[in-house]
Image (spheres, helix red, strand yellow):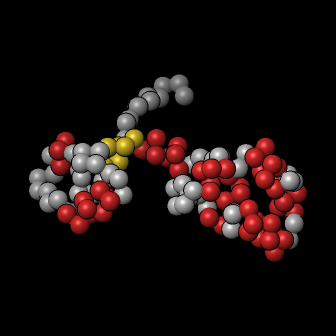
């Protein structure tokens, strides 16, 4: 817009118990939560790890995954387990289901379920 100023901010996610020193130094008093640290380390996070908010959002908002990714357990973060098939590309969907997504979603729910079960999507 004319006359407006755009500010480009970089936002990061830090993980409880693993906070970087530059984050901790923003506060007059800080106590490291050891229980949270252990859990975050079990989840694969590292000391001082900072992740970009935009990268995390982009990852969580993915709309398509490969067949292999959707057959892996646990499912990728952000995938709704009640409609795994939704995340397939149209081509992969048609190869697996032998119909288009529109044809599939026009079927009664019980029929969709019966088709998804042997394919590993239920």
Is the residue 1 above or below the residue 67 in the image? above
Tag count in the figure? 0
Residue at x-position 69% and y-position 63%: 121
Asked if residue 36 lies left or right of residue 6, the reply is: left
- Please, which residue is most extreme toward the front here? 118
The spot of residue 75 in percent (x, y) is 56, 58
Residue at x-position 19% and y-position 42%: 22
The spot of residue 100 in percent (x, y) is 85, 52
Q: Quadrant of residue 32?
A: bottom left
State whether residue 55 appears in this view: yes
Check the picture and name the quadrant holding the C terminus: bottom right
Asked if residue 68 lies left or right of residue 107, the reply is: left
Check the picture and name the quadrant holding the N terminus: top right
- Please, which residue is most extreme toward the bottom here? 110
Q: Quadrant of residue 85?
A: bottom right
- Please, which residue is most extreme toward the top here? 2
Asked if residue 9 lies left or right of residue 116, the reply is: left
Residue at x-position 36% and y-position 58%: 43
Is the residue 104 above or below the residue 48 in the image? below
Q: Quadrant of residue 84?
A: bottom right
Nearest the viewer among 31 and 42 is 42
The spot of residue 3 in percent (x, y) is 48, 25
Residue at x-position 52% and y-position 61%: 74
Is the residue 22 above or below the residue 88 in the image? above
State whether residue 90 appears in this view: no
């Amino acid at each position: 817009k004319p006359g407006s100023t755009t500010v480009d901010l970089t936002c990061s996610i830090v993980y409880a118990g693993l906070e970087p020193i530059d984050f901790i130094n923003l506060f007059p008093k800080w106590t490291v939560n050891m229980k949270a640290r252990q859990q975050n380390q079990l989840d694969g996070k590292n000391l001082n790890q900072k992740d970009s908010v935009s990268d995390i959002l982009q990852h969580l908002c993915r709309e398509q995954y490969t067949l292999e990714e959707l057959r892996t357990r646990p499912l990728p973060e952000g995938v709704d387990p009640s409609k795994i098939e939704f995340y397939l590309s149209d081509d992969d969907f048609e190869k697996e289901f032998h119909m288009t997504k529109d044809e599939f979603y026009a079927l009664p729910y019980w029929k969709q379920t019966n088709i998804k079960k042997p394919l590993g999507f239920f």
